[in-house]
Amino acid sequence: MFEQFMTGLSLVLSFPGFLYLLAGIAVGLWLGIVPGLGGVTGMVVLLPLTFGMDPASGLAMLLGMFAVVSTSDTITSVMLGIPGTIASQATVIDGNAMAKRGLAQTAFGAAFVSSAFGGVLGGLAMAASLPFALAIILAFGSPEFFLLSLLGLLMVGAVSGNAVSKGLGAAVLGLMLSQIGYPVASSMPRYFFGERSLLDGLPLVPVILGLFGLPEMMDLAARRTAIAHLSDEHTADDSILSGVRAAIRNRWLVIRCSLMGVYVGMLPAIGSSVVDWLAYGHATQSCKTDPQFGKGDVRGVIAPEAANNAVLGGSLIPTLAFGIPGSGAMAVLLGALTIHGFSPGRNMLSDNLDITFSMVWTIIIANIIGAAVLMVWGRQVARAAFVDGNFIVPAVILFIFMGSWVWQPGMFTWITLLGVGLLGYLMKAAGWPRPPFILGFVLGPVLENAMSITWQSYTVMEVITRPTVIGLVIVLALVFFFALRSTRRGLAAHAIEDTVESKASLILSSTLAVALIALFGAAVWMARDWKLLAKVSPMAFGLAGIVIMGFVLFQDRNRLRVIAAARRAGDALAGGTTRQFIAANQRQIITFLAIALMAALTPWLGTYAAILGFAAIYAALWGRFRWWVVALYTAGLWAVLYFLYDRLLHAPFELPFFM
């Protein structure tokens, strides 16, 4: 086996294979930065280019690209508070908080080192796990997937800070919205209201970009300042090396989360969607000193970045050994293997073992090169935290809307983006943490599918006597115990969302809770006559949501009493005033309305005119730039639209109504 291991290395380093690997790395670094593109888009674009290549070279380019996407997506998560890909959702929480404190370089250094280590360990663990991978994968069935989904949902407490009840409510809302469309166990579509676009459910990328991206851009536009709240001279201790040292100090956390990423990544359809949350939850629960999670704790960056880069090594095992792709990108890779004449299965572990090991080496080398490039480049990128935010907003709005459009072309996608964006803004203003919503939305289908298959395929005794089920139940109990202990000790008393509690925000929170009670009640009522497997999940989520909203209303009422008592005691500024709250949020609402107007005019004016018109008007009126700056800026955005989305990605743009 060692001979094939070294042969795989020679295949990667040979000419021209190594050049193709470098080309893939360059494409992957770029794709990770642009919101809404990611590894699947890169795989689809690069796959036709590999048809005439040597198999090892073609696979090296594809895997080299995909391996570094989850490294460079850190840039978007840290700088903008927008997950570059689904794998970097948890990084947003503390990474963006560090950037706002002027510590972007420190976040980058810690993230890139952790990512490189996770990727290398993922590749090595993949190679070491090949002999017993079959036993691990076959031991996990639908009961285990159900318990893993519950374990992911148990992380809600870790990503809710000091608003656990609101975090649970956000998670249940995400679970409920994930029920839209066809369920796996029934031919009856749910909650689609005659709209065919909803038959497949809400699209994931617009939901993520809307929930995180639009509220952050609304805030940045309202502040009319740079991303960082501090000036350059106040961040003298911020450097890439500071982040590297932080990662070294927390090396055992890096190792644990990397191993978690490898072995969770082996499980099809669940690895990349939950592993960063599991790692973040583990970091919060294992923290013993000075927890600052939600405010810019570097450990909140290290843990998810180590885990999400290690996922690739684990996800390759079921793809190569059984032909079971665990994600969209692995499905494309499976197609590439077939095109190049390889048959996933025993042949990849025997006759073609050298090709399999070349993939291992590709992951290792790509992660090292990608992290090294980003560490050299990270200082320049971090300076964007001090650039005038008026330069950033129109460009990021372009990437958010076009990233959603590429994922699923159509005006319904933008309607979803705007609707979820408004919801995300209201949640943030009301003090509701947003990460649990995404966690529930992603895990909802996995949880329901696993439950349906378990119900139809297993008896109760068969489930409770499975050794893996017993082991996972023990893990669930331990995680719950440590979460409860952390809460009692006050270690979880941190604010994930940067909000100020006031009378107006609490009234908004209570209003949101009442609206959700009505929503959950309507969802339960609509599901009452459906078939058992079609209605059990939405009814369970709806009833749980109603109960949780009751707790939210009770807590908001108590907080309102505290604020009222403080004001009666003479503290005139206690909790702020409604007028101050409205004034603080007026510019955000104006920005949202301008963005919504841009989307509404797109079918009439066309994609180019609507987006570029918004950018030009924003730069001229809101940014107050000189006319030649507006012209150059708009021309640059036109180039991005034309060359990237139109010519390269062939996005079907909307044409003006007169054409």
Image: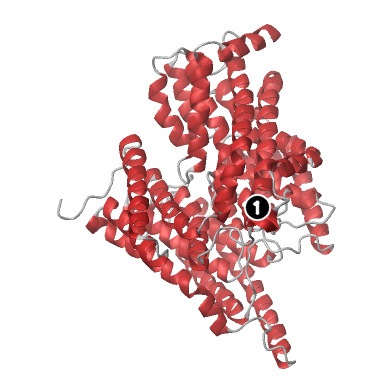
Residue 468 is left or right of residue 232, and the answer is right
Depth order, front residue of 389/357 = 389
The secondary structure type at the circle numbered 1 is helix
Residue denoted by label 1: 153
Residue 368 is left or right of residue 596, and the answer is right
Depth order, front residue of 286/576 = 576
Is 439 situated above or below 64?
A: below
Residue 53 position, x and y percent, is: 43, 14
Answer yes or no: is residue 200 visible: no
Is 111 situated above or below 292?
A: above
For the N terminus, the quadrant is top right
Q: Residue at x 57, y 10 (%)?
A: 352
Q: Residues within 10 Å of mark 1 (few under 14, many from 20)?
A: many
Name the image quarter holding residue 407.
Answer: top left
Three-letter amino acid code at disc 1?
A: Leu
Residue 526 is left or right of residue 494, and the answer is left
Is 314 situated above or below 588?
A: above
Residue 488 position, x and y percent, is: 83, 63
Answer yes or no: is residue 413 visible: yes
Residue 47 is left or right of residue 142, and the answer is left
Question: How is the protein colored in the picture?
Answer: secondary structure
Residue 4 position, x and y percent, is: 64, 9
Depth order, front residue of 421/244 = 244
Q: Residue at x 68, y 66 (%)?
A: 163
Q: Residue furthest left?
A: 658
